[in-house]
Image (cartoon, rainbow, N blue to C red):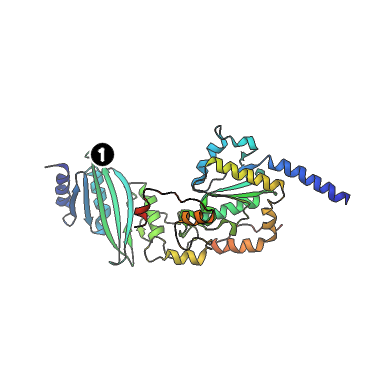
Amino acid sequence: MNHEEHIINTIHTTFKSAEAEIQRKGRLLIRLRSDLLPAFVSYLKNYLDFNHLVMISCVDWMEDNQFELVYHLYSYAQKVHAMVKVRLNRSQPQAQTILPFWDQAGTYEREIHEMYGVYFEGHPDLSEFILEDWDDIPPMRRDFKTREFVNENYEWRKGREDAQDVRRTISERYDEKLPQFNNDDKANG
Amino acid sequence: MKEDWGREAGNIISNWARKHSLWVLAYGTGCGAIEIPPTMTSRYDAERFGISGMATPRQADVLLITGYLSVKTLKRVIRSYEQMQAPKYVIGFGSCTINGGMYWDSYNTVKRLDDYLPVDVFINGCMPRPEAVIDGFVKLQELIASKKANGWIRYQENLDWYRANQKKVIKNWNMPDYNW
């Protein structure tokens, strides 16, 4: 029995509802109910030696009306990377903080709160982080219309409307020879 | 007539002095600030042209906007610019200041710097090489010598227009309103 299977068996003895799979050697994917999350990452950290929180990211599954939080953990002792995925209700996204286990989780959670509007229960400071005076919906949500927002708030400079290859325009304007690059065929289809 | 001649001569002399002591405010926005150390140090040695770094806005002549400006940074840049002593010049550096560059549809970066600050010289490129930066400074020196680098006068005269643009993107304007 290799490392990964051993880890999965150990997980299943305690967390029976966790769905774990081996993606490839050294990489585990674990799906979990969101209310079990703090207990589960604490178990991984203290019991299975996953002592490095690599990052926390968030995915917007708008069609399913869900947010997905992805916790990347790494174990230096076993050289295994575990991705823990939990799904949250998108209309009222709420998760529990894992700040007691890793201090750096606070920064990620603060950013996810700002960019997606996920509320982390138990986080001491979810104030504004990167943005300033933002009063629209959180900008990384997929129903945030970036182009409309830009059109409303900023002035375009002329010349950017048609995303064309400007080299041709420039060569015509200044009567220069257009260089033939090797990847031109690919770019034009 | 005699007075005008005296003022003219004084202008020529002071502009000549100004163009040879361009002190740049050490304020890096965006990724372009990485091109400034090679420009300033021995290989390209911008100090030959009198271009030197300066620590505080009140001592600086040139505000170099090195790259994209998020709304949050724009607020600080305006504050720094208004603290600078006239005559003061703004150089827009990189394509981000011209039309947004690769952040052309970003929700949090301004697209046209000249809507918010009076830009005297634009340096295009992403990133401009140190040669291009020095070329832009030389262009600025020419403009100063020919009395065309008058962005700060433009800013004072059209302050309402600039202020309206600035307040359109900066929602919470909790800065002092200068009145020249």
Where residue A35 sits in the image (x, y, percent)?
A: 26, 59
Whether B103 is drawn above or below A63: the answer is: above
Is residue A93 visible in the rendered structure shown here?
A: yes
User: Does residue B159 appear to the left or right of A143 in the view shown?
Assistant: right
Where residue B116 sits in the image (x, y, percent)?
A: 59, 58
Q: Which residue is mark 1?
A: A76
User: Does residue B2 appear to the left or right of A135 in the view shown?
Assistant: right
Q: Secondary structure at mark 1?
A: loop
Q: Quadrant of residue B16?
A: top right
Q: How many marks?
A: 1
The residue nearer to you, when weighing A22 against A182, is A182
The residue nearer to you, when weighing A32 against B158, is B158
Seen from this angle, which residue lies furthest left?
A1
Residue at 36% across / 64% down in the picture?
A142
Q: Quadrant of residue B118?
A: bottom right
Q: Callout 1: 10 Å neighbours few (<14), some, many (20+)? A: few
Whether B115 is drawn above or below A43: the answer is: below
User: Does residue B178 appear to the left or right of A51 in the view shown?
Assistant: right
Where residue B171 sits in the image (x, y, percent)?
A: 54, 63
Residue at 55% across / 40% down in the picture?
B131
The residue nearer to you, when weighing B70 against A94, is B70
Q: Quadrant of the C terminus of chain A?
A: bottom left
User: Does residue A174 appear to the left or right of A86 in the view shown?
Assistant: right
Chain containing mark 1: A
Whether B81 is drawn above or below A2: the answer is: below
Seen from this angle, which residue lies furthest top?
B42
